[in-house]
Amino acid sequence: MKKKILIVFLVVFQSLTYLIVKQFQTNPHVLGSFLDDKIIFIPQFVYFYIFWYFLLFYVPFYLIKTDKFYTYFKSNITSIIIACIIFIIYPTTIIRDTVITSNISTYLVNLIYKIDTPVLNCLPSIHCILSFLFIFSVMKEKKSFNKYFIIISSTLVILSTVFIKQHVIIDIVLAFFISYIVFKIFDKKTFNIEILKQYKKIYIVSHKNYDADSIISSYLFSNILNKHNIKNEILIIKSDNYEDKKLLNDHLKYKYKEFTNSKNKYFVLLDHNNSIQSIKDDSRVVGVIDHHYFINEKENFIYKNYSSTAVVLYMLFKNIYKFNKYEKKLILLSILSDTAFLKSTRYSFKNKLIFHYLNKNIKLNAFKYENKYFEKTNFSKKSAFNSNYKEYILNNTLIQSSYVKAYESDLKYKPEFIKKLDKLNNYLFIWYDFTNKKTEVYFKKDKIYKLKYNKIRSRGKKIVKKIEKLM
C-alpha cells in the first residue's frame, strides 16, 4: 500500500511542478538546429507519446516487486527537481509548424499542441527523462515480456517527442544525461534475486568454522528465497570448532545438510567471499553476500560495510521482504556476535543506528546476552591457537588466520602462542584482550610483524586490509 501511495504522489508531484514552473517563465529561448529540420513529421507517433501516460503508472507498479522501486522513486523526484530548476533559470520554447487536421493522428497532435500552450519547459524533456528512467530501472532484469515491453515502448516514446515536433534533439540529449547521472547516484549495487530463478536449486553455504552470523544469515537468505519461490538448501562445512554454539542452540532451530561436493550444484556464499573458505570451487559460485571487504564487479557479488552479513541481508531486501520480529531478533544476535557484544570497532555509528532501530520493539538487553553467551577462548584445549580460524586470499597468496579472546589473566599463554608462529608462514594471529579492550596483531611472513590497537579492532574490516598492504 505504501508504494502504491508513493506512485500516486509521483504523478501528482511531477504534474504540479511542471504546471507551477510555467508560471515563472519569461522571455524563453528558442531551440532548434538544422538536424531538427531534417527530422520528418510522423503524426502516427502521437500514440506512443500519449502511451507515456500509461507507462507513468505501469512501470512503477511493475517495479514494486523488484529492488529498483526506491531507486526509481528517488531518481524520479530528483530529476524532476533538476529539470524544473533548469526551466526557471533557462526557459525555452520551440516554434511549431501548423498541422492540418486530416485524420485522427493529426487531430491528436493538434489537441496536444493546444493543451501544451504556451510552449514552455522544453529543455530537458520530461517525457524523455522519465522514459530513460523506465529503461534504466529494468535494464538488469532477466529476460521477460515486461522488460522488453518497457524498453521498447519507452524508446518509442522518446522518438515520438521529435517525430511529432514536441521537442528537439538537445531536449533528449540533456534528458539522457540528467536521468543517467541521477540514476547512477541512487542505483546502489543490489542483489538481483530474479537471476537465481534460472537455476534448478540454489545451495546456500557459510564458511567453515561457522559462527552465529554465518548461520543466521544463511537461515534468513533461505527464507527470502522461499518467499520468491526459489528452491534452496542450506549446507554447512562440517566442523567441531565453530563459534557461538550455545547462542545458536538456544535461538535458532535450522535444517541443514553437510557439504559433500560441488558437482552440478550452484552456490551463494554467505558471510565469506572466496570459495577457498568453503566449497573450494569458484566456478560453481553464482552469488556472494558478505560484510568482509572484497572487490568483485560480477553481478550478485555483494559487499556492504555493516556489522554483520545478516544486517547486509536486511538492508538489501527490506523493501521486498518483510522481516518478522523473530528474524529481526536473529539479526540483533548476529550483530552482538560479530561485534564482540558491541565492543568491536565494527560497531560503528551507522550500525548503532541500525541496532537501535531493530531493537525498538524487541528490547533485547545486550549486557544480559553478553553475560550469557560471551565465551573467551578455552586455553586448556590443544586447538586454542586455531580458534576462529579463517583463510584469506591476499594478493594471490593464501593467508591463514586465527584469533583468541582473552582476559588479562590469560596473558601467561601469549608467549607460547606467539612462539608457534616461528614454524608458520603467511599466518595472521590476533590476541584480543577484553579486560583492557586492546588488540595485538602478529603476522608471520619473512619475519613477525606486530601491530597494536587500543581498541577491539575487527579482523575482517580493518586488520586484513592492513595485512594486505604488508603483502
Image: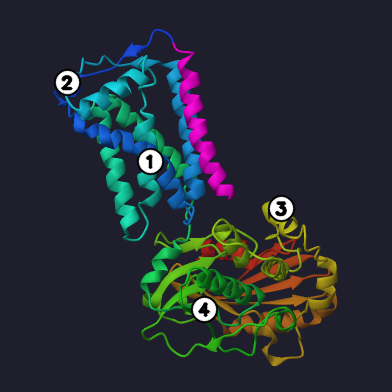
Mark 4 surroundings within 10 Å by alpha-carbon count, few (fewer than 14), some (14 through 19), many (20 or more): many
Which residue was labeled with disc 1?
A: 54
Q: Is residue 14 magenta?
A: yes
Which residue was labeled with disc 3?
A: 353
Left or right placement of residue 406 versus residue 42 in this view: right
Q: What is the total number of numbered labels drawn onto the structure image? A: 4
Q: Quadrant of residue 314?
A: bottom right
CA gap, disc 3 and disc 2: 57 Å
Which residue was labeled with disc 4?
A: 205
Dominant SS in magenta: helix
- The secondary element bearing badge 3 is classed as helix
Left or right placement of residue 95 versus residue 387 in this view: left
Q: Nearer the viewer, residue 137 or 409?
A: 137
Q: Looking at the image, tell me whether mark 3 or mark 2 is earlier in sequence order.
A: 2
Mark 1 surroundings within 10 Å by alpha-carbon count, few (fewer than 14), some (14 through 19), many (20 or more): few
- Amino acid under disc 4: Val
